[in-house]
Amino acid sequence: MLFVERDIAIDLGTTSTLLYVRGKGVSMREPTVVAVDKITGKLLKVGEDAEKMLGRTPANIVAIHPIASGVISDYDMTTRMLQELISRVTSFSFFKPRVIVCVPSSITGVEERAIIDATIEAGARKVYLLETAVATSTGAGIDISKPDGHMIIDIGGGTTEVAVISLGGVVECESIKTAGDEFDEAIVKYIRRKHNVMIGTRTAEELKRSIGCAYPRSEVTSQEVKGRCLLTGLPKA
């Protein structure tokens, strides 16, 4: 067995978490949610496995979203979630990984410390923090070292961050709470009001991704969805 050292980058989002492994690319994308037995406190499942349990299990099993607005809202659950996710991509490595974590530009010193401590406790050897706007612009192929201004708009699940990048750093940044989760909820409300059908947020997100558009289209696009009729209580498409 070959033991190799891993370098990992983590995009710790409110809705989903991505793990990138150097040399392998994006190795994992999981919902940022854990399923916990609220009686015993035991962590049962992480990510997509946790989502699948919800609504199909006893009432004592609850979902916890440990990240809010790009920062830690539940330290213990964030640590345990990261521990599980990191272990999945480093299962054949003898060495603890070095980890880069993307963070909002508006993050405070206390919030930075919490992310570093949680990631180290989860199994990282060394933790580096990188502003999401810088990571996004670099990934888009923008040369941020030049004295040119580039505006980056990052629409996440819980927050939308707008930043201006120049000379290798963030010059100006503003964060608002209107983001992907609010879009999904607006779709849920529209379907309920317009068609008297209740759909879940996952269905709303699928609609948003498949036919959503930032600009008006010349043609009307439609897609069939299934939900529960509010008038009869029966399934309806």
Image (cartoon, grey):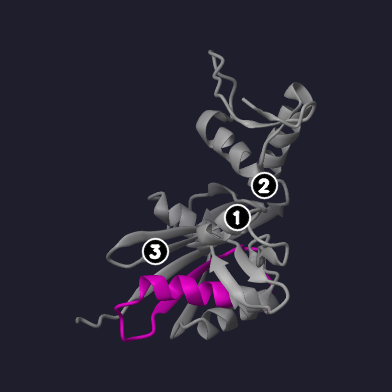
Q: Amino acid at mark 1?
A: Thr
Category of crowding for the residue at label 3, using alpha-carbon neighbours closer than 10 angstroms: few (below 14), some (14–19), many (at least 20): some
Q: Nearer the viewer, residue 168 or 121?
A: 121
| Quadrant in which the C terminus appears | top right
Residue 8 place in picture, x, y as percent = 40, 71
Q: Nearer the viewer, residue 40 or 105?
A: 40
Distance CA(mark 1)–CA(mark 2): 8 Å
Residue 154 place in picture, x, y as percent = 57, 49
| Quadrant in which the N terminus appears | bottom left
**Vertical placement of 39 versus 18: above or below?**
below
Q: Nearer the viewer, residue 38 or 69?
A: 38
Q: Quadrant of residue 109?
A: bottom right
Is residue 117 among the parts visible in the rendering?
yes
Query: Horizontally, is 35 left or right of 141 in the view?
Result: right
Q: Which residue is mark 3?
A: 20
Q: Amino acid at mark 2?
A: Asp
Q: Name the N-terminal-most of marks 1 and 2.
A: 1
Query: Horizontally, is 231 left or right of 76 in the view?
Result: right
The residue at the point 68 percent across, 60 percent down is: 69
Q: Which residue is mark 1?
A: 15
Asked if residue 106 lies in the magenta stretch, the reply is yes
Distance CA(mark 3)–CA(mark 2): 24 Å
Residue interval drawn in magenta? 80-109
Asked if residue 79 lies in the magenta stretch, the reply is no
Q: Amino acid at mark 3?
A: Tyr
Residue positioned most to the left: 1
The residue at the point 48 percent across, 50 percent down is: 148
The residue at the point 55 percent across, 48 percent down is: 152
**Vertical placement of 224 versus 107: above or below?**
above
Q: Which residue is mark 2?
A: 181
Q: Quadrant of residue 2?
A: bottom left
